[in-house]
Structure formats: structure tokens, C-alpha cells
Amino acid sequence: MIRRGAHLASRFARSLRPGGPPATEVARVEAVLAPGELTLWRRMPASDRRESVRVAHHTEAALAGTEYAGDERWVAAALLHDVGKTEARLGPIGRSLATLAGGVAGHDLAPAWQARGGISRRFGCYLRHDEIGADMLQMAGARDAAVAWARAHHHPETWAALPIPLDVAQALARADGEPVA
């Protein structure tokens, strides 16, 4: 719990820095992502694009020297896993409040919140960003690994059934600061 809180605090602090990733990183992203994937990535706020590049770098480093190294499916999954957050249209403070509300009330209420209007809807969308992002990616014709990881990245109990090797799923999760058993 403390580790998760530290991760979220660090991510919050990084999100306050203005600007997106450097042009050299954007060029790399453009070389990896397919057109529909790239369109969704570009819609992400600057801080989310920066974070996605950070996660992609950590994923590549974790997979270096393994049979999975150099496979751009995993880079794409790292870059796109949080694309669903765009639908919530929340800044860092709103995201923090949504995370707290979900922690206190339970994520099971997110669909009901999403069905409402106003800030409740935005909180519900944020808490369901995994499902929303996977649907967005699927509609954009994204590769299967990116769709699957977007949907599953907060649900380790589903990783064994993914079309992604478990070692890769764990590397993706660690790169994003998620706990891995």
C-alpha cells in the first residue's frame, strides 16, 4: 500500500511538469505506432505522452537480452495502455481525486458514476480507463497486444490468459509501477 502511494505521488509530481516528450522520442513513437494508434497517442495530454514514453523505455530495458527484445508490439502496448484516460478529461488534481474516490467507495461503482453526468461521469470514466482505452484501440484498428494490455493492465488475475507472454505482461506492469506478485 505504501509503495503504491509512493508510486502515485511520484507520478503526480511528474505530471505537473509542462510539455510533452522531446522530438527525438516523438519520432521514435511515430516509427513504432500504426496510424490509428498514433492518432490516439497524440490525443493524450502531454504529461501522459511523456509517461508513456518513460514506460516504453523501462519495458524495453526489462526485455533486453530476452527472446522478447525488439518486438515492437510490447513497445506499442506500453505507449498506449493508458489512452483511455483521455475520455475522462481530468487534470492531475481531478485524477488524484478520482483515484481516492475509487479507493474509498470501490471501483465497482465506476460504471454507475460513468452513467451520471458532470464530475461523477468523469471520475467513472477515469476509473474505467482500461476498458475504455481497449475499446478505443480496438475501434482504431490497433494491434491485439495493445488492446489486450490496455484492458488488462490493472487486472493481474487476467494476465495468464492474455495473448501476451506472462513475462512480458510482468515487465510492462513493472515499467508502469504496478505491483507484480
Image: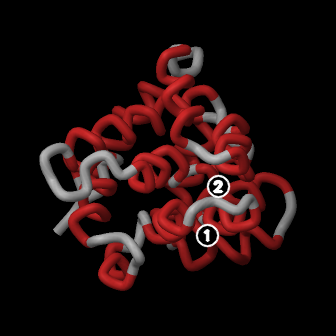
Location of the N terminus by quadrant is bottom left
Observer able to see residue 100:
yes
Observer able to see residue 6:
no
Q: How has the structure been colored for display? A: secondary structure
Q: Position of residue 127 (x, y in %)?
A: 59, 62
Examine the rendered structure and indicate whether residue 18 appears above or below residue 106.
above
What is the CA distance from the residue labelled 2 to the residue labelled 1?
Answer: 7 Å
The outermost residue toward the left is 65
- Count the marks: 2
Give whichever of 37, 84 is nearer the camera.
37
Examine the rendered structure and indicate whether residue 2 appears above or below residue 160.
above
Evaluate if marks 2 and 1 touch, with contact meaning CB atoms under 8 Å apart. Answer: yes
Where disc 2 sits, the SS reads helix
Location of the C terminus by quadrant is bottom left
Q: Amino acid at mark 1?
A: Glu
Where disc 1 sits, the SS reads helix
Q: Residues within 10 Å of mark 1 (few under 14, many from 20)?
A: some
| The quarter of the displayed image where residue 160 is located | bottom left
Residue pointed to by mark 2: 84
User: What residue is drawn where x is 59% and y is 53%?
Assistant: 98
User: What residue is drawn where x is 28% and y is 61%?
Assistant: 168
